[in-house]
Amino acid sequence: MQAVEASGATAGTERDAAAPAADAAVETIHRELTAFARRARASAARMHPELSLVSYTLLGHLEQSGGCRSTDLADHYALDKSTVSRQVAALERAGLIERRLDPGDHRVQVLHLTEAGARILAQVTESRREAFRERLAGWPEEDLRRFAGYLLRYNSATAGDR
Amino acid sequence: MQAVEASGATAGTERDAAAPAADAAVETIHRELTAFARRARASAARMHPELSLVSYTLLGHLEQSGGCRSTDLADHYALDKSTVSRQVAALERAGLIERRLDPGDHRVQVLHLTEAGARILAQVTESRREAFRERLAGWPEEDLRRFAGYLLRYNSATAGDR
DNA sequence: CGCTCTCGGTTGTAGAGTACAACCGGATTG
DNA sequence: CAATCCGGTTGTACTCTACAACCGAGAGCG
């Protein structure tokens, strides 16, 4: 890896006089992930006023899973079922998803992307991906792969408890 | 680096038949950062009911800068000045910060951490850091350093436009 | 069968975070 | 001084979210 180090950023707090380098790294990860998170919503909203970050991830999950229940979404994203219910209602109103009654159990409604929903999702995904690609332009492929791997590892470690 | 790769996670969408590996990595980064962001607020709130993610970052900036104006905070975090105004009001009400009139310019009020504010901030930082440390336990130091570096690089690239 | 319990989902209510627009009062400049 | 700029506050409205109460459909049991 190369001159990433002291690129100013928010690196201000010279911490750890005694702590090992690993602690400094953890601190940086903490700070930078936090900074990213704080901006994500607003920037997502700015990029695609039509599809909030939550709606986007919900649609994404629907696509990936090929249809699932509201409860599954709530579990997966650690959201209250009422929240999901309203989000889903909005997405349905917008014509991006549809509900199909489960013939086997009349309590459940299986959610599916509509054609329009799939289209919008693909479009937003592409535009988001493009934005990321731009920001990551110039990174050596090796670094990209490693970065992706780290994020996967980090998120999967935290999937449960957060 | 080691077996981070196909750790299942959300890596589901086997994309890129034709796309280079770099694209796959970008896609993963995109997905995982998004997932992280979506959870951050709620998990932060769960961890420290007393200090929201925004309040936390605001206090952090105050500490780092050693006092600044509301406008600076708004600029730095791409927030509306009204939002910052209310956050600041709340933080002041809670006794975590104080306003000092700039003797040179009676329009500006320089914000400073109070003793209590510094204490709470340190406490929350420590607890957050501990949570991160736990999640990152077992990572080789080399990976931690690289991960931190990547995040710094990523965030500094996006600092302006987002 | 009928009663209770569980479960998926909706609705009522409330609070945080945010933006935009209008405004206020001190500072700057012509 | 008048016009303007600038830091900050207030009014308003909307979204996201949680919690709690509720509804209707299965499931288990006497």
Image: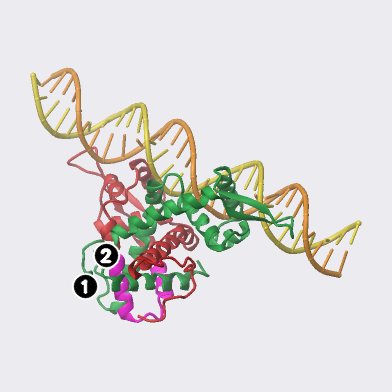
Chain colours: A red, B green, C orange, D yellow
**Which label sits on residue B2?**
1
Residue A144, image x and y in percent? 33, 76
Q: Is residue A90 shown in magenta? A: no
Query: Is disc 2 placed on a helix, strand or loop?
Result: helix
Tell which of B130 and A141 is nearer to you.
B130
- Give the crowd class for mark 2: few <14, some 14-19, many >=20 residues within 10 Å: many
Mark 2, residue position: A153
Q: Residue at x 31, y 47 (%)?
A: A74
Tell which of A78 and C21 is nearer to you.
A78
Q: Chain of mark 1?
A: B
Q: Chain of mark 2?
A: A
Tell which of A110 and A161 is nearer to you.
A161
Picture layout, residue A149 above or below residue A90: below
Residue B40 sits in quarter: bottom left
Q: Residue at x 61, y 60 (%)?
A: B68
Task: Give the quarter of the figure containing the N terminus of chain B.
Answer: bottom left
Residue B52, image x and y in percent? 46, 49
Query: Is disc 1 placed on a helix, strand or loop?
Result: loop
Decide whether the magenta segment is chiefly helix, strand or loop: helix
Q: Judge left or right: residue A27 versus residue B67.
A: left
Q: Judge left or right: residue A106 versus residue A30.
A: left
What is the magenta range? A126-153
Residue B24, image x and y in percent? 29, 73
Q: Are the residues flagged by discs 2 and 1 in contact, CB closer than 8 Å? A: no
Give the residue type at disc 1.
Gln
Tell which of A16 and A31 is nearer to you.
A16
Say whether residue A55 is visible: no
Distance from disc 2 to disc 1, alpha carbons, whole Å, reads 10 Å
Say whether residue A19 is visible: yes
Give the residue type at disc 2.
Arg
Q: Is residue A137 shown in magenta? A: yes
Residue B89, image x and y in percent? 59, 46
